[in-house]
Image (cartoon, helix red, strand yellow):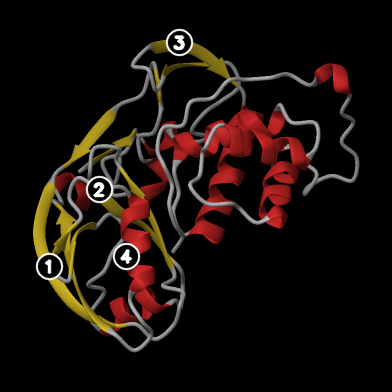
Amino acid sequence: MFCTRNTHKLDMEKLLCYEIGLNDFLFAHIQGQPKEIKIRKTSESFGLTLTDNGCGVVIIKRLQPNGLMDRVSKACGNLIQPGDQIEKINDISFTGKRHYHVAGYLQTIPIGGVFCLRLISPERCPMYMLSSRSSGRSGRQIESGKRTIRLRQDGKVEESEIVDVEVEGTQRINNILGECLGFEDNELAFYIYELAKSSYLPRDLEYHLNSNKLFDFNLPKNLISKLWRVANLQEYSTTNPRSPQNHRKINYKPTSDLKTNL
């Protein structure tokens, strides 16, 4: 279903993405018990963040507290959990699909409509019940100067060094994707971060997004401005000196065609 880095627990914040540290341990999580639940859609927002493993398995990454899916889960004995695979909705299979396909279908369900959600829980091994003996090692996931293996979209493997500011900036972009579009994508967030850092103004980022056909729909200008500000720390500081000579152009080939929001 998916892999986690440096933990055997079902920690959705430790999902394997496009980078592997040279000293990382990977834990593979396999399919466990299937389960079905019927849900009535009572609002446009599901309070649900989706992601996928890039190989056709869409999983629930986060449930928003007191959101629709969180309330339904609690009413059914916590039946819906982060890490669950969304296999089918109303007998329509989403195996082999991406997270935005699921988001798009859920958006088409009218308010008041009832849909059947078929999930598959990840198998819980006996290790899951044990506390980690190496908990003292964990700390920060990526430290300054750490060597990583970066998996490029053309299949090439590149060893590189990343710094904390790059990791933090990518995570801020990912958080906005989750809040505004309903799904998170680590690789997509990283490329948006690079595009935003290479853009002198928000309108330059808008040009990059449109010319690279990163999305099949037009993002609102206020969202593009927010992405640019977050990448360039303007949301977190009052000054951010930038100069045209620091402007650089990067060529980006999209990894997926994002089509809708959740």
Q: Earlier in the sequence, mark 3 or mark 1?
A: 1
Few, some or many C-alpha atoms within 10 Å of disc 4 (few <14, some 14-19, many ≥20)? some
Using the rendered view, name the quadrant where residue 212 is placed: top right
Q: Earlier in the sequence, mark 2 or mark 1?
A: 1
Q: Residue at x 20, y 52 (%)?
A: 129
Q: Earlier in the sequence, mark 4 or mark 3?
A: 4
Horizontal and vertical percent position of residue 244: 87, 22
In the drawing, what numbered circle is on residue 159?
3
In the drawing, what numbered circle is on residue 158?
none
Few, some or many C-alpha atoms within 10 Å of disc 3 (few <14, some 14-19, many ≥20)? some
Q: Residue at x 61, y 45 (%)?
A: 172
Q: Quadrant of the C terminus?
A: bottom left
Residue corresponding to mark 4: 105
Name the kind of residue labelled 2 in the image.
Answer: Lys
Mark 3 and mark 2 in contact (Cβ < 8 Å)?
A: no
Few, some or many C-alpha atoms within 10 Å of disc 2 (few <14, some 14-19, many ≥20)? some
Q: Earlier in the sequence, mark 2 or mark 3?
A: 2
Q: Secondary structure at mark 4?
A: helix
**Whether residue 111 is situated above or below residue 225 in the rendered picture:** below
Residue corresponding to mark 1: 91
Nearest the eye: 197 or 215: 215
Q: What distance separates the C-alpha of mark 2 from that of mark 3?
A: 30 Å
Q: Secondary structure at mark 2?
A: loop
Q: Secondary structure at mark 3?
A: strand
Residue corresponding to mark 2: 97
Q: What distance separates the C-alpha of mark 2 from that of mark 1?
A: 14 Å
Name the kind of residue labelled 4 in the image.
Answer: Tyr
Name the kind of residue labelled 1 in the image.
Answer: Asp
On screen, residue 239 versus residue 229, left or right, reads right
Q: What distance separates the C-alpha of mark 3 from that of mark 1?
A: 43 Å
Nearest the eye: 55 or 131: 55
